[in-house]
Amino acid sequence: MIIDYRPIDTIPWHRLTTCYGRATDIPTLIAEKKYDELAQLIEHQGTLWQATPWALQQLLFRLQNSSVDEVTSDEIDLYLAVSSAFVWEEATSQPVEHMDELLQEKWLWDEDSDEDDDEMEWEEEVARGYEEQAFVSYFLYSEKQLHDMLPKFREIAKLRADLTESVSELITCLDNRPFETIISNLTK
């Protein structure tokens, strides 16, 4: 699994979906640090969406490059919400090899469609971008990125007494799901 950082303005947010429609507002919500609103868009009832791994990439890049003092409880709650979706034991399909493959035309929503077209797309048996390989990839790339941030989460837990409880819960959730085991199960 390969993940290269993409600048926020190179991600076609208007062609990715969340649980409430297009992901067009995500860059603004990230810039304004509206973590509660973001969490509601990228995780809903145990499901992750097309925009989830990309939103996480942007948030975690910022987190990695920020001071521990800048972290808020709402931000940690967002990561907890996403990690709560990691409940399956075994993926049913191989993920794409490179996260950028999730931006292939075959999985992106039409650039020029309107709300009626989008509604019709959701009514399809499998909406565009939610084919098995892509859907599994949203979960695996999201989980991988959170696992990669464990050192930062441990630093936050150590240095921020006000966040220790929630960050420790996040760390425990991730530690209980060793990513290497999940990936090795895919090759069986």
Image (cartoon, rainbow, N blue to C red):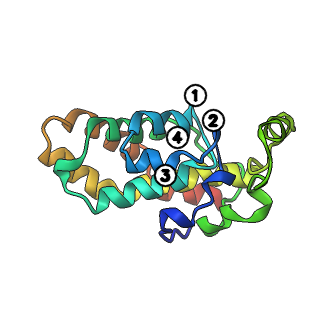
Separation (CA) of disc 3 from disc 4: 24 Å
Residue type pointed to by label 4:
Phe
Secondary-structure class at tag 4: loop
> Crowdedness of circle 1 by 10 Å Cα count: few (<14), some, many (20+)?
few
Q: Which numbered disc, 3 or 4, marks the residue that appears first in the sequence?
A: 3
**Residue denoted by label 2:** 19
Kindly identify which residue carries mark 1: 45
Q: In the rendered view of the protein, which quadrant contains the C terminus?
A: bottom right
Q: Cβ–Cβ below 8 Å for labels 1 and 2?
A: yes
- Check whether the beta carbons of the residues at disc 3 and disc 4 lie within 8 A of each other: no
Q: Is residue 100 above or below residue 130?
A: below
Between disc 2 and disc 3, whose residue precedes? 2
Real-space Cα separation, disc 2 to disc 3, in angstroms: 16 Å
Label located before the other in sequence (4 or 2) = 2
User: Within 10 angstroms of label 2, few (less than 14), some, or many (20 or more) residues?
Assistant: some
Residue at the image point whose x is 40% and y is 42% from the top: 79
Q: Nearer the viewer, mark 1 or mark 4?
A: 1
Give the percent coordinates (x, y) of residue 37. Answer: 46, 34
**Viewer-nearest of discs 4 and 2:** 2
Residue 176 lies, in percent from the top left, at 40, 43
Q: Earlier in the sequence, mark 3 or mark 1?
A: 3
Q: Is residue 10 above or below residue 176?
A: below
Work out whether residue 46 or residue 93 is closer to the camera in this orientation and state it: 46
* Residue at image coords 60%, 46%: 23
- Label 2 sits on a secondary structure element that is loop
Whether label 4 touches label 2, CB < 8 Å? no
**Residue 2, x across and y down, in percent:** 54, 70
Marker disc for residue 86: 4
Left or right: 125, with 9 as reference point = right
Mark toward the start of the polypeptide (1 vs 4): 1
Q: Secondary structure at mark 3?
A: helix
